[in-house]
Image (spheres, rainbow, N blue to C red):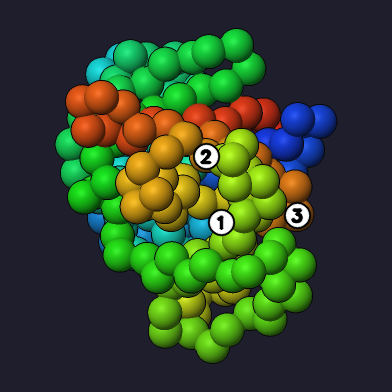
Amino acid sequence: MIEYEVLRVFCGPDGRHGNQLGVVRDGSAVAGEAERQAFARKLGFSETVFIDDPERGVIDIYTPTLRLPWAGHPCVGTAWLLNVPTLITQAGVVRTRTDGEFTWIAAQAEWAPPRTLRQYNSAAEVDALAVPEPGEWIYAWAWQDEPAGQLRARAFPGRDDGIDEDEATGAAALLLTASLGRPLHISQGHGSQIVTAPRPDGLIEVGGRVRQETKLEY
């Protein structure tokens, strides 16, 4: 039996919603890349994290079909769980910090996979969107209050892996922040919240609330 935990990352102010994340604390329990990919596929979350060194923050991230060098909501969730100053991913070292109820990571925009950032005229248009056909990773967004940096977003991975819409997506939020060059407060999915900010050193910070949902065995 493989023990794993389920976190919800980028929860709303009421502690609800957020994107589910599977975390295997003992990465040695699922040692090989093929075995990890198969386990992530069985769990079926948008991402699953395997922790290979909890003290140094070494992690390995998978979608149901892909190994990822870096991803936003897995890093925020794991940073909250381990409470370490940095995480070591395939892409590089991710800085972490905690500020009140928010856990933050700082990463390079170049690490994020390509996304289509598609702007709409209103939040109502974004809400009315149907899930598109697989093939293109689309981050649909619209301003709710542009002077305040508040916007509405939905994410459609387009991978045809059972995840038709991502409830909350750190990498896409990071790319949008880099593109707009300003801090953002993002309402995504059914009620998730993502906060972001460009840093003077060129990194982008992504933050959110994390809640532990359960511990399970598979």
Looking at the rendered structure, the kind of residue marked 1 is Phe
Q: Earlier in the sequence, mark 1 or mark 3?
A: 1
Horizontally, is 134 left or right of 150 in the view?
A: left
For marks 1 and 3, give the one nearer the viewer.
3
Question: Is residue 205 visible from the viewing direction of this image?
Answer: yes
Cα–Cα span, label 2 and label 3: 18 Å
**Which residue is identified by label 2?**
184
Where disc 3 sits, the SS reads: loop
Q: Position of residue 185 (x, y in %)?
A: 59, 39
Q: Earlier in the sequence, mark 2 or mark 3?
A: 2
- Residue lying farthest to the bottom in this orientation: 133
Looking at the rendered structure, the kind of residue marked 2 is Leu
Cα–Cα span, label 1 and label 3: 16 Å
Q: Name the residue nearer the viewer: 120 or 208.
A: 120
Crowdedness of circle 2 by 10 Å Cα count: few (<14), some, many (20+)?
many
Name the residue at 52% across, 39% down: 184
Crowdedness of circle 3 by 10 Å Cα count: few (<14), some, many (20+)?
some
The image quadrant that residue 205 belongs to is top left
Name the residue at 43% across, 66% down: 117
Crowdedness of circle 1 by 10 Å Cα count: few (<14), some, many (20+)?
some
In the rendered image of this protein, does residue 110 appear above or below residue 67? above
Q: Which mark is residue 45?
A: 1
Q: Which mark is residue 59?
A: none
Q: Name the residue nearer the viewer: 44 or 39.
A: 44
Q: Position of residue 20 (x, y in %)?
A: 62, 46
Where disc 1 sits, the SS reads: loop
Q: Which mark is residue 190?
A: 3
Horizontally, is 116 left or right of 34 in the view?
A: right
Looking at the rendered structure, the kind of residue marked 3 is His
Could you tell me if the residues under marks 1 and 3 are in contact, i.e. CB atoms within 8 Å? no
Question: Is residue 77 visible from the viewing direction of this image?
Answer: no
